[in-house]
Image (spheres, helix red, strand yellow):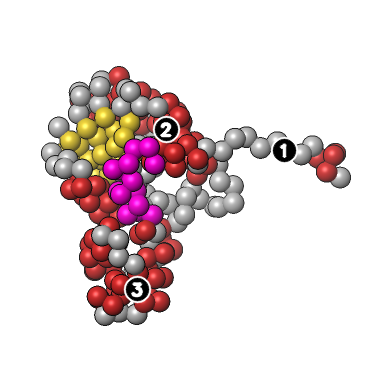
Amino acid sequence: MTVSYIRPDKDFDNVYEQLKLINAYSDQMKLPIDRELIDQISQNKRISERNNVVELFRSLRADTLLIYDVWVLSVNIEDVVQVMSCLLKNANTIHCVKQGIVINTQSDIMVVLGLIDQLRQMVQNDDKKGIGRPRGSKSVSKFDLKLDQIISLLKLGNSVSEIARQMKVSRSSLKDYVESRELKALVQGVVLSNNASDARAIMIETIQCPNIEPNKKESE
């Protein structure tokens, strides 16, 4: 059984954005979705307080779980480790669609650590008031209604200029839209799912080693 789990969050990607990429990934990988759960529970709740989610994850046995990104499970690293450990213990396979990463009991530990470290970097980003990049700051665009078409054309390798010509719209406006929605990065996540070695290398490259904080007296 293939299950998709979507959890919207005001500081990350909304339901629409997650569904779009998961559905595209499902089609490309020929993984028809048998069950879909959209979890509307607040991100502030720990996994133990999200009973319907716990029931779903505990019920999976040798199944496939599609998630947009690891933060969808939780923004609490302890919860993420517990959930992933439980899912893998029960022989499930986890597809992190955005990165094009597939996790199972045979996966490279460096890839798993890369996913967790990516979450750590987002959570510990002191330069932002909230976790991640606030999605609420994006305005509604006329291109939202044509998102399916834009993603499809990008997946086919069309440039923004080519797409603008086909759609008979302003290249600069379309370019701004594609960049603000990070559509090329989203499409790249799907494309990279066919090349496990590339996805692995990219994930490991994101890992950050600890920094040495200068002693306050030394810096004076």
Looking at the image, residue 24 lies above or below residue 209: below
Residue bearing the label numbered 3: 161
Q: Nearer the viewer, residue 29 or 115?
A: 29
Instruction: Using a 10 Å C-alpha cutoff, classify the residue at mark 1 as few (fewer than 14 neighbours), some (14 to 19) or many (20 or more).
Output: few
- Foreground disc of the pair 1, 3: 3
The answer to whether residue 172 is seen in the rendering is: yes
Q: Could you tell me which residue is drawn at 36 percent across and 77 percent down?
A: 171
Asked whether 193 falls inside the magenta stretch, the response is yes
To which quarter of the image does residue 7 belong? top left
- Tell me where the magenta segment starts and ends, as one range: 185-198
Labels 1 & 3 near each other (Cβ < 8 A): no
Estimate the x, y position of residue 86 in percent, counting from the top left: 32, 22
Residue bearing the label numbered 1: 213
Estimate the x, y position of residue 24 in percent, counting from the top left: 22, 51
Asked whether 162 falls inside the magenta stretch, the response is no
Q: Nearer the viewer, residue 122 or 207?
A: 207
